[in-house]
Image (tube, rainbow, N blue to C red):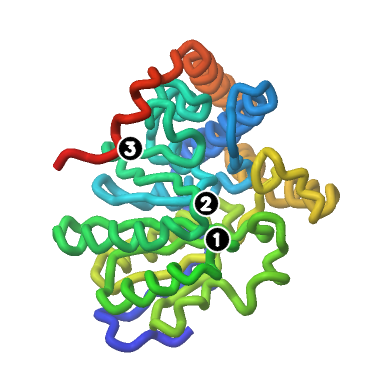
């Protein structure tokens, strides 16, 4: 893609297509492994609690896509902001939000991040720079653009990572946001988590052209990244987050990923074959890939990785126990937190 006009600095090459991810230390690799495993085990437990009737409403699991938010979050710094849509539990955990508070919110309990009033799709943590989960398809994109405007207005050096799915890229407000971000050169990274099926329609049946090129009309550069490899994601995020932070305006990163479960827990996912899902699990699972790398390069032993799994499972079990023991919100809470006193 040619460099857009009026850019302050030359665009870097695409980390995803022109060079391999740089070597990471054993400590970094183990951190990525633990974080992805925490997201995986948490989502598995959430699925179990949903099946038991302890989670009501919608519940969209992130299983299979863990490398995306883990790699991107590793490239951010304190003061940056994150916003996403309804498949958001993994993003919360990657931002450092407490698993107990997330699980309690999923179950509608008082100990949740939104006091049990938001549920799966509506959790926030100003402390961690996480501004939601949003249930309206594409609705978070103008909000993320606004967060980026706030970073620029306050001159705090922050960047907003705004996540959206492949199904959301056809929404009109997405392009209004692209236009504003390009005009004002806002510090925003638009991350398209392309898991191929949106709510249940294959991308090739719903979206014309390449998704990462959707900002071309506005001069926004875009690149595809292997979203099933955490090191490829981290390399691309390092490169482009820095580029955006330097004042060059927005960028679009299309993360080619895959979800193993249906769109939500109520989706049987009959629009794809079991063989397709199994092939992705066998050949491209982000956690298995990193596990193999850790073992092959001598960064960890099988027992050490099993110990990480035990630690993660203990955290998840504790979060489920906390959620079930936490009381439900008092009915009077229905009228609180509707408006923020300024």
Secondary structure at badge 2 equals: helix
Secondary structure at badge 3 equals: loop
CA gap between label 1 and label 3 equals 25 Å
Eye-nearest disc, 1 or 3: 3
Of residue 80 and residue 325, the one placed in the foreground of this image is 325
Q: Name the residue beneath numbered marker 3.
A: 125
Instruction: Examine the rendered structure and indicate whether residue 283 appears above or below residue 190.
Output: above
Residue 2: name its quadrant: bottom left
Q: Is residue 282 left or right of residue 160?
A: right
Q: Name the residue beneath numbered marker 1.
A: 255
Eye-nearest disc, 2 or 3: 3
| Relative image position of residue 107 (x, y in whole percent) | 52, 25
| Relative image position of residue 204 (x, y in whole percent) | 71, 71
Residue 252: name its quadrant: bottom left
Instruction: Examine the rendered structure and indicate whether residue 71 appears above or below residue 251.
Output: above
| Relative image position of residue 126 (x, y in whole percent) | 28, 40
> Which residue occupies 60% across, 40% down?
61
């Amino acid at each position: 893609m040619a460099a857009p006009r009026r850019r302050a600095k030359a665009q870097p090459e695409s980390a995803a297509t022109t060079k391999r991810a740089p070597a990471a230390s054993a400590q970094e690799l183990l951190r990525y492994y633990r974080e992805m495993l925490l997201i995986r085990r948490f989502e598995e437990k959430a699925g179990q609690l949903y099946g038991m009737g302890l989670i009501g409403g919608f519940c969209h699991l992130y299983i299979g896509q863990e490398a995306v938010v883990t790699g991107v979050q590793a490239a951010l710094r304190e003061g940056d902001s994150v916003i996403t849509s309804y498949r958001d539990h993994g993003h919360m955990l990657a931002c450092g939000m407490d698993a107990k508070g997330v699980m309690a919110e999923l179950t509608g309990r008082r100990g949740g991040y939104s006091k049990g009033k938001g549920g799966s799709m509506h959790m926030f943590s100003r402390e961690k720079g996480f501004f939601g989960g949003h249930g309206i398809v594409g609705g978070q994109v103008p909000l993320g653009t606004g967060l980026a405007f706030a970073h620029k207005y306050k001159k705090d050096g922050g960047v907003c990572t705004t996540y959206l799915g492949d199904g959301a890229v056809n929404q009109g407000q997405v392009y209004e946001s692209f236009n504003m971000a390009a005009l004002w050169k806002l510090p925003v990274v638009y991350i398209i988590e392309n898991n191929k099926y949106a709510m249940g329609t294959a991308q090739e049946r719903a979206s014309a052209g390449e998704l990462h090129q959707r900002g071309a009309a506005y001069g926004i550069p875009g690149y595809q990244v292997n979203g099933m490899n955490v090191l490829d994601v981290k390399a691309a995020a390092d490169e482009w987050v820095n580029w955006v932070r330097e004042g060059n305006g927005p960028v679009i990163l299309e993360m080619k990923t895959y979800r193993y479960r249906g769109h939500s827990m109520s989706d049987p996912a009959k629009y794809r074959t079991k063989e397709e899902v199994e092939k992705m699990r066998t050949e491209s699972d982000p956690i298995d890939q990193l596990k193999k790398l850790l073992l092959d390069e001598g960064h960890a032993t099988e027992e050490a990785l099993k110990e990480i799994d035990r630690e993660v499972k203990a955290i998840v079990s504790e979060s489920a126990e906390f959620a079930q023991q936490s009381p439900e919100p008092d009915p009077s809470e229905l009228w609180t937190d509707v408006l923020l006193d300024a």
